[in-house]
Image (spheres, helix red, strand yellow):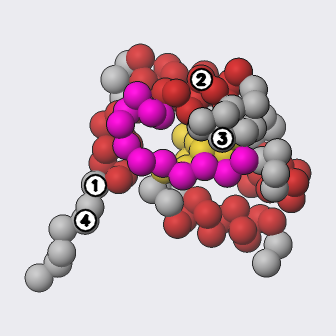
Amino acid sequence: MDALEKIKQQVQSYPVIIYMKGTPQFPQCGYSARAAETLKKCEVEFAYVNVLIDKEVYKNLPKFANWPTFPQIYVNGEFIGGCDIVVEMYQKNELKPLLIAATAPTAPSH
């Protein structure tokens, strides 16, 4: 599987995923730290990929969403934005409802 297929599979597999430098516990850049902290404030589970460890994802992720920088946050397979956009959405009380809806269990169909 090539890197773009791998990224596509990851963003489709997790309701909320952040591609960041480092981990939420040990971020390796200020923007990644702010974005991960903002997601944590929303009190929903999220997946992460440390782009410093996965060099193929690091090289190819900017092509995937046509966004040149890290972090990158995806919700339900859609690119939401980077650090500044996520922080702004949080401040406008738009981020938490979006993440809660994305991570809510789906009702069984009858």
Nearer the observer, disc 4 or disc 2?
2
| Real-space CA distance between mark 1 and mark 3, rounded to the nearest whole angstrom | 24 Å
Q: Give x and y (percent) for residue 23.
A: 66, 41
The numbered mark at residue 104 is 1
State the residue in front, 5 or 47.
47
State the residue in front, 80 or 42.
42
User: Badge 1, how many Cα within 10 Å: few under 14, some, many 20+?
Assistant: few
Residue 9, picture quadrant: bottom right
Q: Earlier in the sequence, mark 1 or mark 3?
A: 3
Q: Give x and y (percent) for residue 75.
A: 49, 49
- Read off the magenta span: 39-50
The numbered mark at residue 23 is 3
42 within the magenta span: yes
Nearer the observer, disc 4 or disc 3?
3
Q: Give x and y (percent) for residue 62.
A: 80, 46
Label 1: element kind: loop
Can residue 76 be seen in the rendering of this structure? yes
Q: Earlier in the sequence, mark 4 or mark 2?
A: 2
Q: Give x and y (percent) for residue 94.
A: 36, 29
- Pointer 4: what residue? 106
- Going by the numbered disc 1, the residue's amino acid type is Ala
- Going by the numbered disc 4, the residue's amino acid type is Thr
| Real-space CA distance between mark 4 and mark 3, rounded to the nearest whole angstrom | 28 Å
- Pointer 2: what residue? 34
Nearer the observer, disc 2 or disc 1?
2
Q: Are the two marked residues, 1 and 4, in contact with CB atoms closer than 8 angstroms?
A: yes
Q: Earlier in the sequence, mark 4 or mark 3?
A: 3
- Going by the numbered disc 3, the residue's amino acid type is Thr
- Going by the numbered disc 2, the residue's amino acid type is Arg
